[in-house]
Amino acid sequence: MPGKNSAALGKEPIGKLLIRQAAPASVGILVMSLNILIDTIFVGNWIGSTAIAAINVVLPIAFFVAAVGMAIGVGGSSIISRALGSSNRQKALKAFGNQISLTLCLTLGMAVLGLLYTNELIPAFGGKGNIFDPARVYYRIVLCGVPFLALCMMGNSVIRAEGKPRFAMFAMIIPSVGNLILDYVLINRLDLGMMGAAWATTASYICCFFYILWFFLSRNSELKISFADFGFDMPVLKEISSLGFVTLARQALVSITYLLMNNILFELGGENSVTVYAIVGRMLMFALFPVLGITQGFLPIAGFNYGARKYMRVRKSINTAILYSVILAIFVFSGIMFFAEEIVYIFTDNKTIIAETPNAMRIVFAATPIVALQLIGAAYFQAAGKAIPAFLLTLTRQGFFFIPLVFILPQIYGETGVWLSFPVADLLSTIVTGYFLNREIRRNLRPS
């Protein structure tokens, strides 16, 4: 039988359950986003605006390696949620053991390769000119800590699948708070510059890893695996990979987007334009935290009830998640539209960047109220274990629409065309996702 916490996913009222699952996820994402945001503010004010661009170059490379852990975590957690929902505890344990083994093997190998090709990767992602040297310093140190981050991301997804969102929230808060404290000590007090920023980030990943390790070794976790569970099981690996590939593909597209944007903007406007994108990118990570929190909270609810064949609860969870997300997205949209200038002043005193960034930010966030449908729709297919539609819907925004648009629109509108690519891609991908989600509900989410 499912444990007490996971069983609640199939019994409690959806609205109450979604708030309970989403609130800690939102707080965790908020703290993590604030960490990235404040880290950028510290770096911009204590090191310089070029340092902001340098970090923006490194993040997609480091996060792609870490995203392997996230992908394995999301893929395996979908299995765990559905296995607990159908009372198949042994499959849940095997999936968790395989998640750990797979994450370790892949991320350690990728980190080693990343370090070997440092001088090739950094320029490829836009680390050119004055950006290269600070980016290289930051990259080499941060990449050493990325396997720890990957294990944290994997473990965090599993904690949510167990129906314990508060522990998952703390797992996100610990590295964020730790990073900010260490930023102050290493950059401001010890004047270590980019090296200090990098060590602050790496040490925070390691702290998070030890917290998650404690969670699974303590009585808090339902999943008590044996050494036999670490051995690779091909059917389980195949299922983890097919579902996790959706998340990995999403992060791969994010990394490709950074690569394209940094290079295109460097050609159009130099280092200042790359810095503008870095600030807008940080706001994208930060401002959408409540919507992303709803999405994270929705996943275990939908997965558990789908595994338990409670399809009407799945439908209600979809509708409730979309409603809550749209309301929150409207608040985000309004804040960006009214306070764009004030936001930019927090990051830098560079007059050129202050003049250019608010307009870019307003354009990028123009379609924010409708992105909730796209996020929840793609998340549903992943939670239900439907890898192919989840994968294709994940590709729609950045793969099918954004990347072609970012090549086409700048040819017509210049740098403004780069920013226009964001809302146009959001609109088109939401239309596509809405169509397929509506068809899925009508065909397959009918009363048992």
Image (cartoon, rainbow, N blue to C red):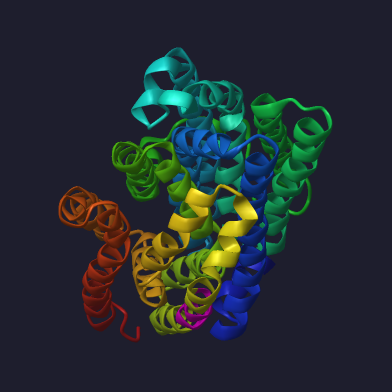
Q: Residue 439: name its quadrant.
A: bottom left
334 is higher (above) or lower (below) than 103: below
Q: Nearer the viewer, residue 177 or 6?
A: 177
Relative placement, left or right, of 60 versus 170 is left
Look at the magenta stretch and give its main secondary structure: helix
Relative placement, left or right, of 156 versus 278 is right
The residue that appears at 51% across and 33% down in the rendered structure is 54
Relative placement, left or right, of 303 versus 43 is left
Residue 354 x/y as whole percent: 52, 55
Q: Quadrant of the C terminus?
A: bottom left
Q: Residue 14: name its quadrant.
A: bottom right
Residue 192 x/y as whole percent: 74, 25
Q: Nearer the viewer, residue 19 or 355?
A: 355
Specify the segment rendered in magenta. 324-332
Residue 215 seen in this snapshot? yes
Residue 3 x/y as whole percent: 65, 63
The residue that appears at 45% across and 31% down in the rendered structure is 232
433 is higher (above) or lower (below) than 276: below
Q: Residue furthest top?
A: 116
Residue 336 x/y as whole percent: 51, 71
Residue 395 seen in this snapshot? no
240 is higher (above) or lower (below) than 405: above
326 in the magenta segment: yes
Q: Nearer the viewer, residue 443 or 290?
A: 290
